Amino acid sequence: MEIIFVLLLLMIIGSIVALETKDLLAAVISVGAVGLILSVTFLFLAAPDIAIVQIVVEVLVLVILIRATISRDTTAVSGDREFFGMAVSIVLLVVIVIFGIRVFSDIPQFGKPIIALFRDAPSNTYISRGLKDTGAANIVTSVILDYRAYDTLGEATVLFTAILGALAILRSKARKKLKGK
């Protein structure tokens, strides 16, 4: 549970950086980092399906934001770096490495199923009663279409809407460029 609090703290820090920075591209990168940390948080909360949707939507939104930012914000990169920016980057890198070492040390050994650790997990119910409850011979189909049908429909709707939004925004910018020529 303490890992989730660390992730929440990192998301708050990333949000503050996104709000306070004057560089648009740095703000977009900070927002992307917050979205990535949110998907990792979903993984720790045992919601991998929501984490996957979060990553897909985040990538689509970042593509749109980076494209919009690069066209508006042209900054020259100089050889001099600020000491504060370098120090913050190194501290964040060290925190991420320590966090990664801590997380990967908790992974069970290869060949030891995680499902055996949690006897009352929903997945055990799906496996033991899936054929009887749903009549589907394929357990994946029974989970997606019977046990979690509304969840799957919601995720598909979010993905479809995000893709349509990305296509609409990217296509209108391309049309404006063609009309301008």
Image (tube, grey):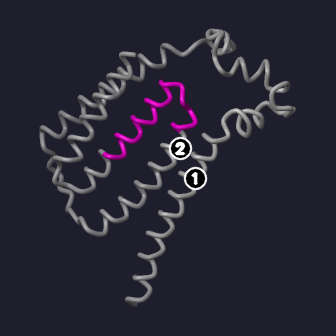
The percent coordinates of residue 163 (x first, y second) are 53, 59
The local crowd at label 2, few if under 14, some if 14 to 19, many if 20 or more residues have their Cα within 10 Å, is: some
Q: Hey, which quadrant is residue 115 in on the image?
A: top right
Q: Principal SS element in the magenta part?
A: helix
The residue located at (40%, 82%) in the rendering is 177
Q: Label 2's element?
A: helix
Q: Is residue 31 left or right of residue 106?
A: left
The percent coordinates of residue 96 (x first, y second) are 35, 27
Indicate whether residue 50 is drawn in magenta: yes
Q: CA distance from mark 2 to mark 1?
A: 10 Å
The percent coordinates of residue 4 (x first, y second) are 38, 23
The residue located at (48%, 19%) in the rendering is 104
The amino acid on which the numbered mark 2 sits, given as a three-letter code, is Val
Q: Quadrant of the C terminus?
A: bottom left
The amino acid on which the numbered mark 1 sits, given as a three-letter code, is Thr
- Circle 1 sits on which residue? 157
Q: Hey, which quadrant is residue 67 in on the image?
A: bottom left
Residues in magenta?
A: 31-51
Q: Quadrant of the N terminus?
A: top left
